Amino acid sequence: MSLFGYLRSTILSKVVMAITGAVLVLYVIVHTAGNMLIFIGKDSLNSYSAFLHSLGPILWIIRAVLILSAILHIITSIKLKFENLAAKPSKYAVKNYLKAKLSSRTMIWTGIMILSFVVYHLLHFTFRTTNPQHYYPEFYQPHNAVSSIIIERFDVYRMVVLGFQNPLISIVYIVGVILVGFHLDHAIQSMFQTLGYNQKHYFPTIQKCSTTLAIIIVLCLVSIPISVLLGFIGGEI
């Protein structure tokens, strides 16, 4: 069976959609938590980055899983979308209580824009190709090392601050994060719904939890460029 052979089965497609969605949501949560270390200080964020790079092959395996999950998620979502449109005019049988909110009506468009945002975000902060002038090495002495040992590591803190000091970059990032929030809100609900967890007596709770999580993630992530622009972070650079 080919990699995309599961697409012939609607049930398998829904399972793949849910699993890949869960993987991507988990990544967003961990990524947000890691980024919040910038508020603790330069050493915390740079140490976190150094830890990730120290994983070596494991880090690339994680990246491969994320990339594969994103590809399968996109392809499967398109397939299920066309199936739903062909089967019935309404998206779901429970439309009477799952309202067509803005986040649900714009999933395709926010998905496309998020993909563009993620590509730019990776080119900027991961591969450092769009703004290489923002990259600086940091010569760091570990707390548990003898005085003669100096280690060179990425100065992620400086790179993030210099990047977000550019208002245009901050605006692009803020808009991208808001789009992620809209997409995430409906995506979590769809993940449960495609697996059949859409009963009236508890699905409204899932809706509220997904919206709350999306809002928290958006507020956390947009607080970084806003804090940099206001001088609360990186004023010493």
Image (spheres, rainbow, N blue to C red):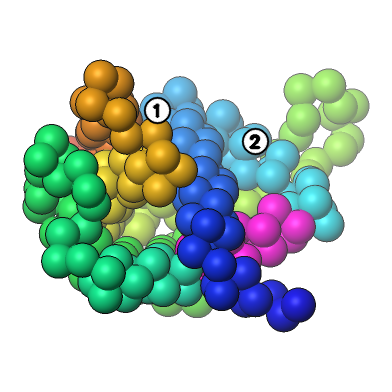
Residue 144, visible in the rendered structure: yes
Q: Tell me the tag on residue 192.
A: none
Residue 177, visible in the rendered structure: no
Q: Image quarter for residue 200?
A: top left
Give the residue at x 68% y 63%.
64
Q: Nearer the viewer, residue 36 or 152?
A: 36
Q: Image quarter for residue 167?
A: bottom left
Q: Nearer the viewer, residue 92 or 47?
A: 92
What is the x, y in percent for residue 144?
Answer: 83, 21
20 lies above or below 48: below
Q: Main secondary structure of the magenta part?
A: helix
Tell me which numbered mark, 1 or 2, is placed earlier along the sequence.
1
SS at mark 2?
A: helix
| Local crowd size for mark 2, using a 10 Å CA cut-off: few (<14), some (14–19), many (≥20) | some
- Say whether residue 90 is magenta: no
Quadrant (top left, top right, bottom left, bottom right) of the C terminus: top left
| Local crowd size for mark 1, using a 10 Å CA cut-off: few (<14), some (14–19), many (≥20) | some
Total label count? Answer: 2
187 lies above or below 113: above
- Say whether residue 68 is magenta: yes
The amino acid type of the residue labelled 2 equals: Ser
Instruction: Give the labeled residue for mark 2.
Output: 47
The amino acid type of the residue labelled 1 equals: Phe
Instruction: Give the labeled residue for mark 1.
Output: 39
Q: In screen coordinates, is 85 left or right of 160?
A: left
What is the x, y in percent for residue 190?
Answer: 34, 47
Q: Nearer the viewer, residue 78 or 217?
A: 78
Q: Which residues are magenta?
A: 60-73
Q: In screen coordinates, is 61 left or right of 209?
A: right
What is the x, y in percent for residue 26?
Answer: 52, 40
